[in-house]
Amino acid sequence: MLNNRVLLKGNLTKDPEYKTISDKDLVSFRIAVNENVGNGKEETVYLDIDGWNSHAKYAENVALSKGDRVIIDGRLRQRTWTDKNGGNRTSYSVLPSTFSKVVKPTFTKSETTRSEATEGVEATAFASPS
């Protein structure tokens, strides 16, 4: 049973940051997840994503960048710390089990009819498991 699982589809708000910590690769980025809440209104939630090892390599290989749409299946992680004024702080991030960059199919001029038939169809390229 999975008690802590999130499935998200959103867009990167800026280019990812890459680091190496204790010989492990890390990619960090923030996504904006938009949701229609009725009456023509939309809410946006911003979430930090931390992908380790194969996820960092995947993000580099697909040239993940600001504006790219991603699908993330993972879990929430909570961090707590004491700030410099002695106050308790908490933040949340998502650790992906898998994630993928959503890519739109591209067609040549001779495939215009096919392109019109598949307008709005999205494809994905998946990250390998860690």
Image (cartoon, rainbow, N blue to C red):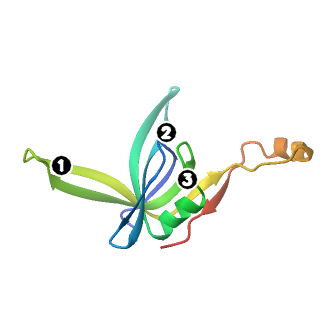
Q: Is residue 97 left or right of residue 85?
A: right
Residue under pointer 2: 35
Kind of residue at badge 3: Leu
Q: Which residue is mark 1?
A: 89
Circle 3 packing at 10 Å, graded few (<14), some (14-19), many (20+), is many
Residue 40 is marked as none
User: Which secondary structure lies at badge 3?
Assistant: loop
Q: Nearer the viewer, residue 54 or 120?
A: 54
Q: Earlier in the sequence, mark 1 or mark 3?
A: 3
Residue 81 in the image: above or below residue 42? below
Towards the viewer: 54 or 37: 54
> Residue at coordinates 11% horizontally, 47% vertically from top-left?
84
The x, y position of residue 27, in whole percent, is 43, 59
Which quarter of the image is occupied by the N terminus?
bottom left
* Circle 2 crowding by C-alpha within 10 Å: few under 14, some 14–19, many from 20: few
The span from disc 2 to disc 3 (Cα, nearest Å) is 23 Å
Kindly state the secondary structure of the residue where label 2 is placed.
Answer: strand
Tell me what residue is drawn at x 30 percent, y 52 percent: 92
Q: Earlier in the sequence, mark 2 or mark 1?
A: 2
